[in-house]
Image (spheres, rainbow, N blue to C red):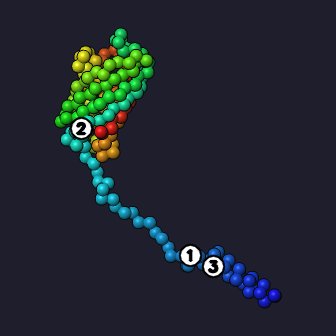
Amino acid sequence: MFTKMIVFSISVFGLGLVFNHGIQELIPSVQAHKIEDKTAEQFVCTPSNLSGNYGVSADGVVLESSLPFIPVGPVASIGRLTVKGNSIFVTLQDNLNGNVTPFLEYTGSFAVNRDCTGTFATVSQLNSSLTAQYTFVVVNRGKEIQFLRTGGSSGVKTVIRGVAKKQ
């Protein structure tokens, strides 16, 4: 029995040495290497690769308004954006502080930079005094456009942001 205990003790002691001091020599080392992803090449934005239809949603708040049909308060919008060449066509339905509008049509133009930032401007087909200017960034290789309203109709001050997703 004494011999078995000595053998057991030596075995445990030996395992302790291996695990405490020699494990690195028993297990092969692994090193991470950067693998270049050929599919992640820089996406360059052009009007032609943004052409198509997008579903739009936006929300924000009207802070000030001198126009009687645009009330101060929260705003939410849904609709469709169509990009053709440098032109855009937008159909939107708005909820302006609880007042739901019918779908309204807007037309406009846009400019996009190679780095996928840009601007666009719209004017209402119903009332040409309803205008809006936006800045945007294209993400996900042209599948999504995130935008921020930066100006528009005289007497209307807003904070509105939104996203257009390619259909």
Residue at horizontal 75%, vertical 82%? 9
- Find residue 59 and report its image quarter: top left
Residue that badge 3 annotates: 18
User: Please, is residue 66 above or below residue 57 in the view?
Assistant: above
Mark number for residue 148? none
Q: Are marks 1 and 3 in contact (CB under 8 Å)?
A: no
**Residue 117 at x, y = what percent?**
29, 38
Disc nearer the start of the sequence (1/2): 1
- Find residue 4 and report its image quarter: bottom right
Residue 136 in view:
no
Residue that badge 2 annotates: 52
* Crowd band around label 2 with a 10 angstrom C-alpha radius: few (<14), some (14–19), many (20+): some
Q: Is residue 31 left or right of residue 43?
A: right
> Hey, what amino acid is under mark 2?
Gly
User: Please, is residue 115 above or below residue 156 in the view?
Assistant: below
Q: Is residue 84 left or right of residue 40?
A: left
> Hey, what amino acid is under mark 3?
Val
Q: Secondary structure at mark 2?
A: strand
Residue that badge 1 annotates: 24
Kindly report the distance in space between the C-alpha atoms of the residues bearing marks 1 and 3: 9 Å
Q: Are marks 3 and 2 in contact (CB under 8 Å)?
A: no
**Residue 167 at x, y = what percent?**
30, 39
Disc nearer the start of the sequence (3/2): 3
Residue at horizontal 36%, vertical 31%? 57
Q: Secondary structure at mark 1?
A: helix
Disc nearer the start of the sequence (1/3): 3
